[in-house]
Image (cartoon, rainbow, N blue to C red):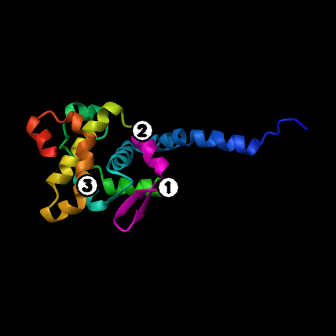
Amino acid sequence: NNTWKWDIDAIEAKELLDDVGLLLSQKILQLPIECQDVVKLLACVGSKCDQSTLKIFEGKVKVRSDDMSGGKINNNPENDNWLSMLDLAVDEGLLKKEGSNYTFAHDQIQHAAYSLIPENDQGHLHKQIGELILEHTSDVEVDTLLFTVVDQLNRGQQTIEEEIKRLELV
């Protein structure tokens, strides 16, 4: 028998895998805008982040591009309760909470959340994250967060305009 045998289940599974990113993005976009922002921010920080580090960003970093033009930080909190937004993302199955750490339930969720941030805004956001962590971290804590800070600033280096700040990064 020289005939093709189609494995319909395998074909359908492949199509589902291709659509996972799109489905996850759509799920994130159905959340309240404040929750979307927190999930996108966490996607920039990494696959996991502790509550105290995330609290640094509350009211200081906005993920929406209209708030990020020119890399400016919006220091006007809108009473967004980030912890309740993180808990909502946990309830929706996007994040897991382990002690004071929030992690993405799957790396595809992190990738989908990050892909929702316009590329031209990603560098500004990474720069803001790195600068805020550095600014709000004690000398003792810097050792544990050094790689995070350097990674964030490196990812945002194209947005660093001041020569002295570029030299500090090096």
Residue position marked by numbered label 2 in the rendering: 115
Q: Which residues are magenta?
A: 95-116
Please tell me in which quadrant of the rendered image residue 16 appears.
top right
Cα–Cα span, label 1 and label 3: 28 Å
| Disc 1 to disc 3: CB gap under 8 Å | no
- The residue that mark 3 highlights is 147
- Per the model, the C-alpha gap separating discs 3 and 2 is 23 Å
Residue 113 sits in which quadrant? top left
Q: Which residue is nearer to you in this view: 156 or 102? A: 156
Residue 128 is inside the magenta segment:
no
Nearest to the observer: residue 158 or residue 97: 158
Q: Residue furthest front?
A: 2
Which one is closest to the eye, mark 1 or mark 3? 3
- Judged left or right of residue 37, residue 77 is left
Quadrant that contains the N terminus: top right
**Badge number at residue 93:** 1
100 vs 54: above or below: below
Left or right, 13 with respect to 62, comes to: right
